[in-house]
Image (cartoon, helix red, strand yellow):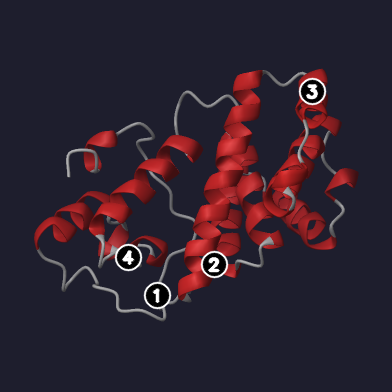
Amino acid sequence: MSWIKVIGFDEATGKLKQIYNKIKGPNNQIDNVLSIHSLRPHTLVGHMSLYKNTLHHSNNTFPNWFLELLGTYTSYINKCDYCYKHHFEGMKRFLNDDKKAEALKQHIEADTLSDFLSKNEFALVDYAKKLTFQADKIKKEDIENLKSLGNSDGEILEVNQVVSYFNYANRTVLGLGVNTNNEILGLSPKNKDDESAWNHQ
């Protein structure tokens, strides 16, 4: 599942086992993107906190499917197949519209999202691309353009943080050879704001 040693659920003890018990999915599944942290459990705590607070917090303004789209798109352009597969399934579940989800997938892969999304949605996707590949080229005018389309400063921050999180996650996965072997794709937290699962560790 990766190029470095990973301690699985059955082998885990102590603090790692406590964390695993808080975040496990069906059949004690620990997503490989999380178990990759098993040799340094404190970074698993940090990853989970970042993930939940950027992508699955009730104070977010954008709908879950759109934030998942940003993650799916960022993962695709980073060539991170692991995150692309997982978060496409997450987006598909939140959309509850298989036809639209499949159309979005086709447009992502054809680089034609501008033909399918609203002007504002595509501007945010374009910002995600620039943040991923040319962060040093982003100017105040880019942010002013997003504001002119009706996005608040908080909403722009929200998008920035989701895209930044996915760049972090993509590089964790790609840099350590994480794959989707033995995983159920597209699971996400049921309780968005339950920080008790990791903050006290």
Q: Nearer the viewer, mark 4 or mark 3?
A: 3
In the rendered image, residue 42, in percent from the top left (x then y), is placed at 25, 53
**Label ID, residue 182:** 1
Mark 1 vs 4, N-terminal side: 4
How many numbered circles does the render carry?
Answer: 4
In the rendered image, residue 162, in percent from the top left (x then y), is placed at 56, 41
Residue 194 shows in the view: yes
Q: Nearer the viewer, mark 1 or mark 4?
A: 4
* CB within 8 Å, label 4 to label 2: no
- 190 is higher (above) or lower (below) than 186: above
- The residue singled out by tag 4 in the image is 35
The amino acid beneath tag 2 is Tyr
Mark 2 vs 3, N-terminal side: 2
Q: Is residue 23 left or right of residue 126?
A: left
Q: Quadrant of residue 17?
A: bottom left
- The residue singled out by tag 3 in the image is 144
Mark 1 vs 2, N-terminal side: 2
The amino acid beneath tag 3 is Glu
Q: Dot 4: what SS?
A: helix
Q: Dot 3: what SS?
A: helix
Mark-to-mark CA distance, 1 and 2: 12 Å
Mark-to-mark CA distance, 4 and 2: 14 Å
In the rendered image, residue 160, in percent from the top left (x then y), is placed at 62, 37
Q: Is residue 123 left or right of residue 48?
A: right
Mark 3 vs 1, N-terminal side: 3
Front-lying residue, 28 or 46: 46
Front-lying residue, 105 or 1: 1
- The residue singled out by tag 2 in the image is 82
In the rendered image, residue 151, in percent from the top left (x then y), is placed at 72, 21
Front-lying residue, 182 or 8: 8
Quadrant containing the C terminus is: top left
